[in-house]
Amino acid sequence: MYAVAEIGGHQYKVQAGDLIDVEKLAKDAGSLIELDQVLFIGGDKPLVGAPTIGGAKITAKVIMHDRSRKLIVFKRKPGGYKRKNGHRQHFTALLITEINDGNGNVAKIDKASKNATKYLK
């Protein structure tokens, strides 16, 4: 089972066990977060929200907060002048632990998976 969720104004396709980077969230590292803005659930019986699916939620664990790699931007001005600018975006890493469709179907992370053994203790 997979789901499409809206997190911080962006849409992400997630499955249980996925590690995703989203815009920085105001949560502590190691805490659990419930995402209720589920737009679509795919699998054997797909569910489409209008705009969201009532009762559906995604549970995720906040792994860490960090900054992405530097993005170099060149600004060219008339007359041959060039300015170099850099930017590093803040992000939060989330581990998707459970997807619940609101009808009793739940997809949980496999405890033997690589991400589960590394981040869930």
Image (tube, rainbow, N blue to C red):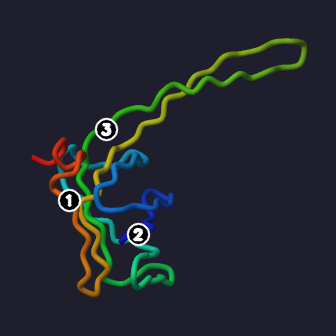
Q: Secondary structure at mark 2?
A: strand
User: Would residue 21 be found to the left or right of residue 28 on screen?
Assistant: right
The amino acid beneath tag 1 is Asp
Q: Nearer the viewer, mark 3 or mark 1?
A: 1
x%, y% of residue 1? 35, 72
Label 3 crowd (10 A; few <14 / some 14-19 / many >=20):
many
The amino acid beneath tag 2 is Ala
Q: Looking at this view, is 112 or 75 the one in front? A: 112
Q: CA distance from mark 3 to mark 1?
A: 24 Å
x%, y% of residue 113? 22, 51
Q: CA distance from mark 2 to mark 3?
A: 23 Å
Whether pointer 2 and pointer 3 mark residues with C-beta atoms closer than 8 Å, the reply is no
Q: Looking at this view, is 20 or 52 the one in front? A: 20
x%, y% of residue 99? 29, 70
Q: Which residue is mark 2?
A: 3
Q: Which residue is mark 1?
A: 110
Which of the marked residues, 3 or 1, is nearer the chain's N terminus?
3
The amino acid beneath tag 3 is His
Q: Which mark is residue 65?
A: 3
